[in-house]
Each structure stands twice: as structure tokens, then as C-alpha cells.
Image (tube, rainbow, N blue to C red):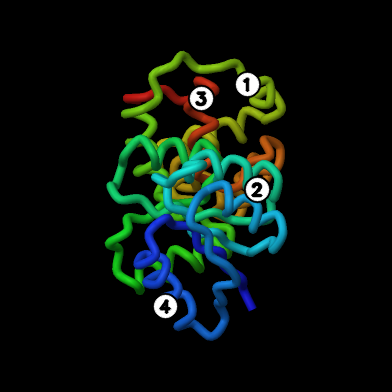
Amino acid sequence: MTSVLICDDQELVRVGLRMIVDSQPDLEVVAEAGDGAAAVEIARARRPDLVLMDVRMPVLDGVAATGRICAELPAVRVLVITTFDLDEYAYSALRAGASGFLVKDAPSDEMLVAIRGVLRGDAMVSPSVTRRLLDRYLTARPAAQPQLDTLTEREKDVLGLIARGLSNAEIAGKLFIGETTVKTHVGRVLGKLRLRDRVHAVVFAYESGLVRPGE
């Protein structure tokens, strides 16, 4: 059984999310929290498989809570539930370690697809959406990332194309290699850079200067 922690300061929202999660035979809500600090403490104690995390909350906001959970409990996935699509909170949550985000008014079936995708290790924000977020909110100069030097030139090519929103099939066509080879390169890139998923690969590519906003 897959365990889920729901964190939102509105009880009605928590009730709605619980109904969606508990409607599935393989998903179970094991705890609820009304603020980010409580979510961190419960996550430490219960080690849920997934946290559904609101962003605007008292005591500790969802972005800070996501950062603490992802840093301390790397096996726990966080799916952020936002009020507005493509806002600064979504960007901050991705940088903090979230594996995806959804708007609160998303249909229940869409929410379940996102939940299962994150649990599989997929990033439930498309690289193109992540790129738009980074184009909008990444204003600082790229920071030096010595980990970039651990990649081969081919792996850097693959990382750059991931950051531009290409799928594995599209990368394979662009580089004239097999899709299986692309998957191998992607796995090596994530492993060498110690990144959770493709979304964080996109963030890394931008913040390292490998890809620049607007390119």
C-alpha cells in the first residue's frame, strides 16, 4: 500500500484530497497536516511515499517544508498543489526538490495521474513548462557547477536537449542515436549530478549556464 501525507491549511481541501486518494485501492492517506512545520515532523516520523503539499500556509510555507523533506528524506516524493499555474511558488517548489505541481482545481483523474507519475519517479511537470518557469523567474547569473565537468560531451548534449523540452525519442532523432542509448545517457546524467528527475535536470542545466533563458 502506498502511503500519502496531505498538507494544506484548509480543512475542506484536505477532505477533498483524502477522498480522491482513498478512492484508490492501492493508495492510503496515513496523516494530514495543517502547516509546513507539522508536515516536516510527520514526514520524519511516518516516512510516507508521497506528500501532497500546499504552498501558502502558516508557521512554515510549503516551499520551505518541501526543501526540508527532500533534503532529509530523499525517498519521499513531493507533489505541490498550487492555486495558480506558473507562479513563483511553483518555481521555488521545483528548486526545493518537488517532483511536480498541480493546480488545486485540477480534475480528480488528472490528480491521480500526477500522483502515480510522481510515485513512478516521473516528473509531473513537462520540461517545456519548467523552461517557461525558468525563463520567467531565473534572473540571477548562472552559478558555477563543478558537477557539470563530470559529464561527457555526449551527456552534456543530452542534458541540454532535456532542458529544451525534448523527449527521449526527439533527442534520439536529434543526435542520431537509439532511444535506448538516450535512456542510458539520461540515467547517467541524473546519477552523476545526483538529481531526482528530469525536472531537476532542467533546473540544473539553466542554473549552471549550460542553457540560458530565451534560448
Q: Position of residue 32 (x, y in %)?
A: 53, 65
Could you tell me which residue is drawn at 51 percent across and 68 percent down?
116
Residue under circle 1?
Answer: 145
Q: Which mark is residue 187?
A: 2
Instruction: Report, in whole angstroms, how far the alpha carbon at label 2 lies from the one at label 1.
Output: 19 Å
**Residue 207, which numbered label?**
3
**Neighbourhood count class around disc 3 (C-alpha, 10 Å): few under 14, some 14–19, many 20 upward:** many
Q: Nearer the viewer, mark 2 or mark 1?
A: 1
Please state which amino acid type lies under the numbered disc 4. Met
Q: CA distance from mark 3 to mark 4?
A: 39 Å
Q: CA distance from mark 1 to mark 4?
A: 43 Å
Could you tell me which residue is drawn at 70 percent across and 54 percent down? 44
Q: Are marks 3 and 1 in contact (CB under 8 Å)?
A: yes
Front: mark 2 or 3 = 3
Give the position of the C terminus as an image quadrant: top left
Q: Quadrant of residue 20?
A: bottom left
For label 4, the SS is helix
Going by the numbered disc 2, the residue's amino acid type is: Gly
Q: Which one is in front, 125 or 154? A: 125
- Residue 205 seen: yes
Distance CA(mark 3)–CA(mark 1): 8 Å
**Left or right of 44, for residue 137:** left
